[in-house]
Image (cartoon, helix red, strand yellow):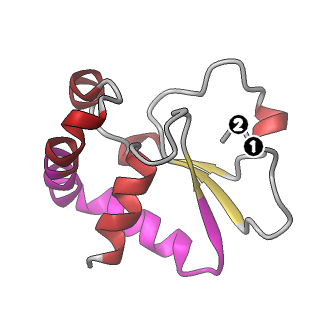
Amino acid sequence: MYEPPASDDGKRILVDRIWPRGLTKQRAAVDVWLKEIAPSTALRKWFGHDPERWDEFRQRYFKELRDNSVEVKNLEELLSGGKATLLYGAHDAEHNNAIALAEYLNSL
């Protein structure tokens, strides 16, 4: 998210519940902000981007996604329109909700 938009990003979809700090809307170039697909506030706070909690975070987040089928369906419809990039505000590129969400979507 903190990297500049690329011409091959396609639709840029922010999948965080809160806006990334220090980032203007213009610089972010977000096309769609899906707050409701993000992990719950309680889960996000519990995880705290601790890599040791990653596996458990994924399991809990996947359960939230299964229980949030309307938002998952909305995202699937957005993704069916061509290339898209899931955006996130975490600084850890390997342990964040966008990575987990992509994994979940690929398992459907």
Whole-percent x and y of residue 103?
34, 66
Asked if the stretch drawn in magenta spans residue 80, the answer is: yes
Q: Quadrant of the N terminus?
A: top right
Is 49 in front, or is 63?
49
Left or right: 83 in relation to 71: right
Residue furthest out toward the front? 52
Residue nearer the viewer, 74 or 96? 96
Which residue is painted at 30% across and 39% down in the image?
39
Q: In the image, which disc is placed on residue 2?
A: 2
Marks 2 and 1 sit apart, C-alpha to C-alpha, by: 4 Å
Give residue 6's position: percent from left, percent from top: 82, 59
The question of residue 57 being in magenta is answered with no
Horizontally, is 66 left or right of 74 in the view? left
Q: Residues within 10 Å of mark 2 (few under 14, many from 20)?
A: some
- Assess whether mark 1 and mark 2 are in contact (beta carbons under 8 angstroms): yes
- At 20% from the left and 42% from the top, the residue drawn is 57
List x then y, in percent, for residue 60: 14, 45
User: Vertically, is 58 above or below 16?
Assistant: below
Tag shown at residue 3: 1
Specify the amino acid type for callout 1.
Glu
5 above or below 57? below
Magenta region: which residues?
Answer: 59-85
